[in-house]
Every structure is written in structure tokens, then in C-alpha cells.
Image (tube, rainbow, N blue to C red):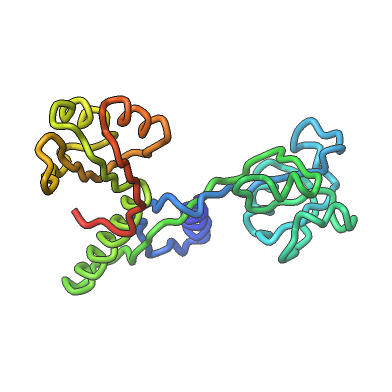
Amino acid sequence: NIFEEKQREFTARGRPLALKRIADLGFGVCRLSLAVPKDMKIADVAALNGRKIATSYPEITEAWLKERKINASVVIMSGAIEIAPRLQIADAVCDLVSTGETLAANGLREIETILESQSVLIRRAGAMSPEQEQIVQRLMRRINGVLKADESKYIMLHCPVTALEKVKAALPGVESPTIVPLQGVTDKVAIHAVCGEGVFWETMEELEAAGASAILVLPIEKILD
């Protein structure tokens, strides 16, 4: 994690960061990786000795190279780092990667992951006033509500009374759904539920096979428990 990397770096300099990580947020997930052209014959990172590496993260890259005793030159760039080998500015790149599609589109392949990262929430490490603590807790509650909503779906369906237990058992990640009577209908009810797991086509087909009909799956924007 980049936050942890910076903490170690500043601690080594005798200036520890007065910050505390509250939570990993689970988005912005990426990795800082070394990549080389696909046709470059390189067995391991030691083959980077004497070569040039383009990056927007020179301090982290230089520290990593020093730790592994690799004598490579770091070329500082910003923007489209992945084109550096094609422009003959550098032999390799050190850049943030999420899916790897951009590297592949530019004829590059990853050879080493320097560190992995994601978005995190941090706070001051020292004491905070009750008002400040309340703000932090409120912020975390709202963030968790958005993250939980992103993983959940709201599902509505009609169900024969005789198949109620079977349909309820097929609902993914539901503790107790809401059962609503249908006006003018005695042999069917409506079921509303927040599903804590993904609702896939197979799930909907399983619910249909259990007797459900008029199945509707909706996204959820926010959740407060």
C-alpha cells in the first residue's frame, strides 16, 4: 500500500507521519508495476541493470531499485508513461496498473509488482475533540453505506403463498424479506428484499423455477443500517 510505503519512508528519515489509517475503501485498486516491451528478452529484474526506466514515481522506484541493488537510470515522466519505450526514451516503465489493458495496447508486459494499493481513509494519529470524532464516525457511516449499497441489490417479485418458503430460500444474502399482500389476490404475495450478494441471471431463473414471477432487480444508491 502506498500509504504504508510512505509511512516507512518518513519513519526511516526520522519524521514519522502523524497519520492513522482508518479503513481500506475497496476501490481505486491498482498496483505499481515494472513493465517492458513484449519482445524484450528479460528473465528477471536483474536484467534491468544499465537500462532506463520511465516513471512518475521516481522516489518509490529508486528506493526499490536500490533495495535490490539494480543499477538502472530513472527517467521522470508524466502522462502517457507507457509510450516511453516506443519513443526510445526508456527501456522499461514503472507505472500504476489496474487492468493491464493499457500496457497490453502499447505492447508491454509486466515483469514485477513493486507494491499494491487501494483508496484508504486516513486521519490524524493524535487525539481529536469529541466533535471531530463525531465527524469521522459520520463520514465512515456514510462511506460504508455507499460501499454496502454498491454490493447489494433490491429485488421485488410476486410469489404463490404455497411456494413462499422455497422462494425465500432462493433469495441470496437475505435474512428476512418483506412480505406484502397483493390487493384483490389471496393466493399470491409480493416479496421485497435487499440482497447482500450479487443477483445473477441464474439466481433469477432459480427464483422463477421456485414459483416466483414479475421479478425486478434494482440498484441501491445508499444504505443505512
Q: Is residue 93 left or right of residue 122?
A: right
What number of labels is visible?
0
Name, please, the residue furthest toward the right: 88
User: Percent x, y for residue 16?
Assistant: 43, 61
Q: Quadrant of residue 56?
A: bottom right
- In the displayed structure, 39 sits above or below 146; it is above
User: Residue 36's spot in the image, x, y percent?
Assistant: 79, 43
Residue closest to the far front:
184
Is residue 124 shown left or right of residue 89? left
Instruction: Give the quadrant of residue 134.
Output: bottom left
Q: Of residues 112 and 103, which is closer to you in this image?
A: 103
| Picture layout, residue 154 above or below residue 129 | above
Can you give x and y, in whole percent of width and height, for residue 44 in the image? 75, 33
Q: Residue at x 77, y 56 (%)?
A: 54
| Residue pictured at 78% horizontal, 44% vertical | 108
Along the viewing direction, whichever of 117 and 50 lies nearer the viewer: 117
Q: Is residue 133 left or right of residue 148?
A: left
Residue found at x 50% / y 54%: 28
221 left or right of 97 in image: left
Image coords of residue 50 (percent x, y): 85, 46
Q: Residue at x 18, y 27 (%)?
A: 163
